[in-house]
Amino acid sequence: MSRSMKYLFFSIKLDSRRARPNLTMGPFPLCVLLPMTVLAMVVAVAAEGNAVDDEYTWPQWKVPLVRKRRTVPLGSPNFSARPQPEPSGTCGIECQRRLPAASLDDLEQFLSYETVYENGTRTYTSVSVQGLNEVTAWSSNVSSSSRHKREVYGPDTRFTISDKQYSTKYPFSSTVKISTGCSGVLVSPRHVLTAAHCIHDGRDYLDGVQELRVGILKDKSRRGKGGKGRGGRGKGRRRKGDKDQEEAQEREEQGEKGGRKGKGKGRKNRSRRSVESGRPLFKWTGVKKTQVPKGWFKGVSDGLTADYDYAVLELKKAPKVKHMDLGVIPSVKKLPAGRIHFSGFDDDRPGNLVYRFCSVSEESNDLLYQHCDAKSGSSGSGIYIRLKEPGKKKWTRKIIGVFSGHQWVDVNGNGMQQDYNVAVRITPLKYAQICYWVHGDSSECQVA
């Protein structure tokens, strides 16, 4: 009980002692008034506690429906684009303030999408958006604050999760590596959310997307079942092909390309040294199809391209790893801590999972600026926060954005560029689209 409430209770108690000769105060007996006052104070304390608790609870959003309108075949992509670790010319928060609000027709065009399949074929799907006016207002959360240069701000606050006991356990295990050099996060048993620029440069798909793969962290010290006893002979014994594949995966993890096939002495020693180091290996899984929103493509959304820097990959086989659900939050800065978290495979720490957390410095309806220390390779990581489930004491992590990475931002729309760390927010509309990609049925995506 607060000091002011204690004082109020003591005053009421003192007044009741003085009023004992006359057991009425106006039209109400004191014996009735006193319990009512105490009850009112209890209700006030409970209401205050609920208000505080609501700040730590996931809000429930009614989201619009994104429905397929028509799907048409397209020609096969050239797969000729080169990765751009630092996209330039992005219209950031300040630049977007000068743009007119997108109409419903515009949004439907931006949310239409291309699908590339594993055999190299491609389709275009137009969509309709329903129930947009019924969604709770997604108010602007723009705030002014100073920002600094990207990557590492003063002391490096990143944490290398090198211990296999942690890197292969949730939530770190939900982070995956994309074969084009980015990171991603599992948002369903077989769907990965990543950045669109990790797949497409705005004009064409990247070289390597036709054979896109996703790496799942695994404990490389595990040599299979039955590996113990008699040198690992029996049911769990690895075949020669399995060993060669594991060494090839390890060469890819360490950035080695080409080379002769076979069992070179140096290659074998590198494999042994890497196993002894205790760092995890990647188990690579092929991608069945890739979906990118049309808003990311050049000449479609003009200054809003950065808002659509996300893509979803459907895996051929579901890994036995726990995924992280999507969430929608109206403002990160208004949360009690105001911090975000994400893990990725930064290029300057090859083979290691890197975790970080930081505060958000500025946010708009679709973008987040933050000071998280990061390097190339972490683009596409899932940004998450941890809040309580409504009506429960259980705390749950959910993905609220995609780390786009360091970008050269056109601040005022006049060509003057500054470099910031940018993330794309999961809005109700984006939630509806990604949920539709994952489930294939928009009726399962009405509430976030």
Image (cartoon, rainbow, N blue to C red):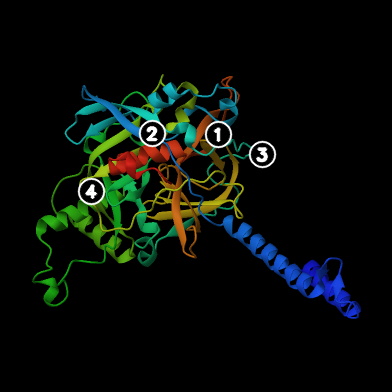
Q: Mark 3 points at which residue?
A: 146
Please name whichever residue, 390 or 411, is drawn nearer the observer in this view of the structure: 390
Mark 1–mark 4 Cα distance, whole angstroms, equals 34 Å
Q: Earlier in the sequence, mark 4 or mark 2?
A: 2
Q: Earlier in the sequence, mark 1 or mark 3?
A: 3
User: In terms of image quadrants, where is residue 7?
Assistant: bottom right
Residue 281 x/y as whole percent:
28, 57
Q: Which amino acid does label 2 sit on?
A: His
Q: Are marks 2 and 1 in contact (CB under 8 Å)?
A: no
Q: Name the residue under label 1.
A: 419
Please name whichever residue, 330 or 22, is drawn nearer the observer in this view of the structure: 22
Residue 391 is left or right of residue 198, and the answer is: right
Instruction: Check disc 1 and report its element: helix, strand or loop.
Output: strand
Eye-nearest disc, 2 or 1: 2
Q: Is residue 259 above or below residue 18?
A: above
Q: Is residue 239 above or below residue 448?
A: below
Instruction: Check disc 2 and report its element: helix, strand or loop.
Output: helix
Q: Which amino acid does label 4 sit on?
A: Thr
Eye-nearest disc, 1 or 4: 4
Residue 324 x/y as whole percent:
38, 53
Q: Is residue 151 above or below residue 40?
A: above
Mark 4–mark 3 Cα distance, whole angstroms, equals 42 Å
Q: Residue at point 26% right, 66% down?
A: 221
**Which residue occupies the extreme front position in the image?**
27
On residue 285, which mark appears?
4
Mark 2–mark 1 Cα distance, whole angstroms, equals 17 Å
